[in-house]
């Protein structure tokens, strides 16, 4: 079990600073569990209200722009690929390639947010927002649908922002050679976080856009 | 071990006197030492505890006579909310893991620190920010929160008081709790010293391990629920608002999906401490080590599935009520396993009734009453009779205060010599323990009776026939508080003038008793190697050897 002690052996390290990549990864996975449960609460709400208002959910879902949602899905899935390429590039010692892959990831992330902005903006324009004029005309089930839509995609968008900041921080550390070919765990953790954001979208997309 | 060389220079000086990068207050506020962080938690938490205790005393004073005694109904509503919020979110939930888990978890598994020391400090800051927000919410506009600590909708969405800020405080505290749990799980998996297998870990570590899993897996659910309340108040999204088609019962589900497991976050670490204290002072290895260890995990697992018993009278379906009731009875089994094993450990032990042991015995007595009355509430028909009465209040305080609170006191007395390197006055500590025991039962036992007779909870007024019970109860609160004050004064005087503590004043067998009191910065000169279980007293091992020969 105690390979951490062996890892530290021989190197005189600063007090309290000892490196344990496996431990870091484990901590990250535990954190991802908490994220899944955070969204889990919302998925429970979605399931309940879909059960209570099955017809209204179908009607409301027709309001969403399938094309925009589809584009965003493609964007996010591709960005998951580029982040992995960035990790592998760093592991193989190609610092420059790794950084450009991460730049592409960040660009995709931003693009996703821009699309989301236009989607939300269009809804707002039509008065479909909590307490908005159009939404007040709709049935209770549709109000629930859009309430959940804004909360869930909003929270997801917030996670994209956090993920972008995380990746940006890691890129800065790669640039400064803090993270290198032998010390890449933090980049991998950022990648894991980005995949989580991706996976949550993979569930959000069909739940809101596809199921009719 | 190989990295013993790293630790060697700091070994002679205890962690209070190590010269670090920073001096004075900054040496505390910027520390990543798990021991200092534990002490910082203890300091802040004591302040919160005494504040919430004062609110409790004021509430009891209001209940002294029917009608308005010292405060208005609105003030009373705010006081029971604040009493609950502060006690639960700032004291009972983080209590033992944050203070004693931080201080002793790494030492008991033979590590130099937790896995993520900086994250540990971040947890402390989040705790402080959460606490500060809770206090700010008192002074901001709108007035003191009056929803009760459960923040039930739709009232929490409609009231004009400062709910959003308090709820956000609870959210931040949840974050702190998650990060602590995550840190502890990783520490236990990665930093056990050579030879410290899972089944050689002290039972306190097992209980912290189970607790941490609940913290990680349950807290996010309440996090999102509380965020939804804030959004509901700010934008009116409608998910919990019946006027818009939302279902308030769903809020209760989501709230209790966290908050029931949370009562095991509160009680499991306390059970772990009891499993440390009893073998130490009975001079016997613990009876049934494996069942106690596994029962912690069982409580964590089954405890996750019983939340519906908080909602028996909310109109959920009969099928689900029966299932939740059954599961509630099942979760009593592992608790029972623990209690019987503790008692079996005492059997034929050479019992030394020191202050920590006295508190542990008090716990066994009080917790048994609390646990058994829990079954009265877990059974459907009796629950409908006593739901939302003082019976629930009494049960809750018997398990929470009698469980976690009393054991928090026990922990301080048990580990005080190790944490501060000083001894307290043993006689005074025992006197305080007796007064606390008497005060506690005088305060809370009458609540069972009046609850059974129909006295509803959270009312600031009552019918005259309940007055005698309220009177006894209020007098009990005075006794209890004087006991607690004597205890605090005794500990503080021990801190100032106590004699120097030896490294192992109690004859404990776990690793923290092998290091000096207080421990050096990195805990050990050399990372220890363990080749036996946690509770093998040397005297007994010797006797066994003689017998074998």
Image (cartoon, grey):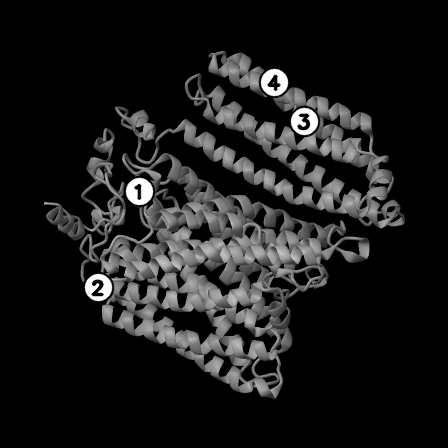
Dot 1 crowding, Cα within 10 Å, few <14, some 14–19, many 20+: some
Quick one: quadrant of the C terminus of chain A? top right
Can residue A125 be seen by looking at this rendering? Answer: no
Q: Are marks 3 and 1 in contact (CB under 8 Å)?
A: no
Residue at point 38%, 77% (across, down): B438
Q: Are marks 3 and 1 on the same chain?
A: no
- Image quadrant in which you'd find residue A134: top right
Q: CA distance from mark 1 to mark 4?
A: 45 Å
Residue B379: x and y in percent read 58, 64
Task: Tell us which disc is closer to us: 1 or 4.
Answer: 1
Q: Which mark is residue B498?
A: 2
Q: Are marks 1 and 2 on the same chain?
A: yes
Residue B89: x and y in percent read 51, 57
Can residue A52 be seen by looking at this rendering? Answer: yes
Mark 2 falls on what kind of element?
A: loop
User: Please, which chain is the residue tagged with disc 4 on?
Assistant: A
Dot 2 crowding, Cα within 10 Å, few <14, some 14–19, many 20+: some
Q: Residue furthest front?
A: B548
- Image quadrant in which you'd find residue A43: top right
Note whether B330 is above or below B433 in the view shown: above
Residue at point 30%, 62% (across, down): B413
**Which residue is denoted by mark 3 in the rendering?**
A110
Q: CA distance from mark 2 to mark 3?
A: 62 Å
Note whether B186 is above or below B518 in the view shown: above
Residue A162: x and y in percent read 59, 34
Q: Are marks 1 and 4 on the same chain?
A: no
**Which residue is denoted by mark 1 in the rendering?**
B200
Q: Nearer the viewer, residue A127 or B455?
A: B455
Dot 4 crowding, Cα within 10 Å, few <14, some 14–19, many 20+: many
Q: Which mark is residue A82?
A: 4
Task: Tell us which disc is closer to us: 2 or 3.
Answer: 2
């Amino acid at each position: 079990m105690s390979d951490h002690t062996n890892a530290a052996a021989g190197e005189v390290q600063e007090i309290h600073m000892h490196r344990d990549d496996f431990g870091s990864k484990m901590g990250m996975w535990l954190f991802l569990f908490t994220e899944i449960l955070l969204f889990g609460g919302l998925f429970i709400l979605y399931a309940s209200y879909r059960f209570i208002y099955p017809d209204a959910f179908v009607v409301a879902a027709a309001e969403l722009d399938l094309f925009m949602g589809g584009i965003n899905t493609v964007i996010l899935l591709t960005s998951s690929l580029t982040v992995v390429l960035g990790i592998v590039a760093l592991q193989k010692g190609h610092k420059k390639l790794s950084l450009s892959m991460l730049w592409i990831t960040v660009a995709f992330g931003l693009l996703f947010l821009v699309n989301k902005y236009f989607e939300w903006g269009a809804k707002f324009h039509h008065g479909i927002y909590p307490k908005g004029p159009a939404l007040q005309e709709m049935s209770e089930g549709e109000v629930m649908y859009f309430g959940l839509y804004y909360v869930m995609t909003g929270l997801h968008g917030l996670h994209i922002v956090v993920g972008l900041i995380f990746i940006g921080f890691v890129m800065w550390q790669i640039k400064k050679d803090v993270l290198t070919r032998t010390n890449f765990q933090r980049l991998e953790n950022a990648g894991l976080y980005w995949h989580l954001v991706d996976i949550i979208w993979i569930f959000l997309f069909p739940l809101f856009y596809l199921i009719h | 071990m190989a990295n013993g060389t790293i630790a060697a220079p700091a070994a002679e000086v205890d962690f209070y006197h190590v010269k670090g990068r920073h001096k004075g207050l900054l040496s505390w506020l910027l520390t990543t030492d798990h021991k200092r962080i534990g002490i910082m938690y203890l300091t802040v938490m004591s302040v919160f505890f005494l504040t919430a205790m004062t609110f409790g005393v004021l509430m009891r004073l209001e209940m002294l006579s029917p009608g308005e005694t010292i405060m208005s109904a609105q003030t009373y509503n705010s006081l029971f909310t604040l009493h609950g919020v502060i006690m639960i979110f700032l004291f009972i939930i983080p209590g033992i893991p944050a203070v004693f888990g931080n201080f002793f978890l790494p030492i008991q598994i033979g590590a130099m620190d937790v896995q993520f020391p900086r994250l540990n400090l971040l947890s402390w800051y989040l705790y402080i920010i959460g606490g500060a927000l809770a206090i700010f919410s008192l002074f901001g506009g709108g007035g003191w929160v009056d929803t009760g600590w459960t923040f039930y909708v739709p009232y929490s969405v409609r009231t004009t008081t400062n709910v959003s800020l308090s709820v956000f405080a609870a959210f931040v505290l949840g974050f702190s709790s998650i990060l602590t749990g995550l840190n502890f799980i990783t520490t236990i998996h990665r930093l056990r010293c050579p030879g410290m297998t899972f089944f050689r870990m002290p039972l306190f570590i097992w209980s912290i391990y189970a607790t941490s899993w609940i913290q990680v897996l349950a807290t996010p659910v309440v996090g999102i629920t509380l965020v939804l309340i804030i959004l509901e108040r700010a934008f009116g999204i409608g998910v919990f608002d019946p006027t818009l088609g939302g279902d308030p019962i769903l809020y209760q589900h989501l709230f209790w999906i966290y908050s029931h497991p949370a009562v095991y976050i509160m009680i499991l670490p306390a059970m772990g401490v009891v499993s440390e204290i009893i073998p130490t002072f009975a001079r016997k290895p613990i009876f049934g080590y494996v069942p106690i260890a596994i029962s912690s995990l069982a409580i964590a697992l089954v405890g996750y599935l019983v939340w519906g018993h908080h909602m028996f009278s909310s109109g959920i379906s009969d099928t689900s009520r029966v299932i939740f009731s059954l599961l509630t009875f099942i979760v009593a089994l592992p608790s029972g396993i623990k209690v019987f094993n503790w008692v079996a450990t005492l059997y034929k032990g050479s019992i030394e009734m020191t202050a920590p042991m006295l508190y542990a015995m008090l716990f066994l007595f009080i917790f048994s009453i609390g646990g058994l009355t829990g079954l009265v509430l877990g059974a459907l028909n009796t629950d409908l009779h006593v739901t939302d009465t003082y019976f629930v209040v009494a049960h809750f305080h018997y398990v929470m205060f009698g469980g976690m609170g009393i054991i928090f006191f026990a922990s301080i007395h048990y580990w005080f010599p190790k944490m501060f390197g000083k001894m307290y006055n043993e006689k005074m500590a025992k006197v305080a323990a007796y007064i606390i025991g008497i005060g506690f039962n005088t305060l809370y036992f009458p609540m069972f009776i009046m609850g059974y007779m129909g006295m509803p909870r959270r009312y600031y007024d009552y019918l005259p026939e309940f007055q005698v019970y309220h009177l006894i109860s209020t007098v009990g609160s005075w006794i209890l508080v004087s006991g607690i004050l004597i205890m605090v004064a005794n500990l503080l005087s021990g801190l100032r003038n106590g004699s120097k503590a030896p490294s192992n004043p109690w004859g404990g067998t776990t690793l923290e008793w092998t290091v000096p009191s207080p421990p050096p910065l990195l805990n050990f000169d050399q990372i220890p190697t363990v080749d036996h279980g946690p509770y093998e007293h040397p005297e007994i091992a010797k006797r066994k050897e003689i017998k074998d020969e």
